[in-house]
Image (spheres, helix red, strand yellow):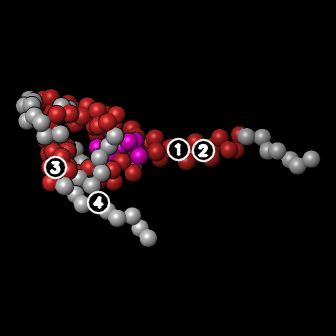
């Protein structure tokens, strides 16, 4: 017996559209935003859920999302229109997010090698 999915309300769908609009305005991909936000491949799926309106981050993560997308929380909640920014501001933010996402991807690739290396350095315990 699986859990019943709650229906997506119009307000949730609109908030998801605002997340998508803010991301597209910066010219970044769902994957880049996912890595910049969560530092993991699973971050991409989270962003997709937000854009569909099926899930939303907790308040602490919502603040981080607003900072990454350079939007006011009231905009995402539909209480305020988006503020106009210059193309220079947008390209600077996009470049910073892409760099953050690239660093997160690189870190994720290096993690298995680090774990393997640390395991090889551990002394082996022998049964007495």
Alpha carbon distance from label 2 to label 1:
6 Å
Look at the magenta stretch and give its main secondary structure.
helix
Residue 61 falls in image quadrant? top left
**Secondary structure beneath disc 2?**
helix
Labels 2 & 1 near each other (Cβ < 8 A)? yes
**Can you identify the residue that label 2 sits on?**
115
Which stretch is magenta? Answer: 33-40
Q: Residues within 10 Å of mark 3 (few under 14, many from 20)?
A: few
**Between 122 and 41, which is closer to the camera in this rendering?**
41
Q: Earlier in the sequence, mark 4 or mark 1?
A: 4
Q: Mark 1 = which residue?
A: 111
Q: Which mark is residue 11?
A: 3
Question: Alpha-carbon distance for marks 2 and 4?
Answer: 40 Å
Q: Looking at the image, is mark 3 or mark 2 nearer the viewer? A: 3
In 3D space, how far apart are the residues under numbered discs 4 and 3 (Cα atoms)? 13 Å
Q: Residues within 10 Å of mark 2 (few under 14, many from 20)?
A: few
């Amino acid at each position: 017996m699986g859990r019943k999915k709650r229906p997506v309300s119009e307000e949730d769908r609109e908030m998801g559209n605002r997340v998508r609009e803010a991301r597209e305005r910066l010219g970044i991909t769902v994957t880049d935003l996912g890595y910049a936000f969560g530092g993991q491949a699973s971050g991409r799926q989270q962003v997709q859920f937000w854009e569909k309106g099926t899930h939303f981050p907790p308040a602490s993560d919502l603040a981080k999302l607003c900072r990454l997308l350079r939007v006011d929380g009231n905009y995402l909640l539909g209480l305020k229109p988006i503020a106009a920014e210059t193309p220079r501001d947008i390209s600077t933010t996009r470049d910073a997010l892409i760099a953050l996402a690239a660093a997160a991807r690189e870190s994720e690739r290096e993690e298995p090698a680090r774990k393997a290396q640390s395991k090889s350095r551990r002394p082996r315990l022998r049964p007495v």
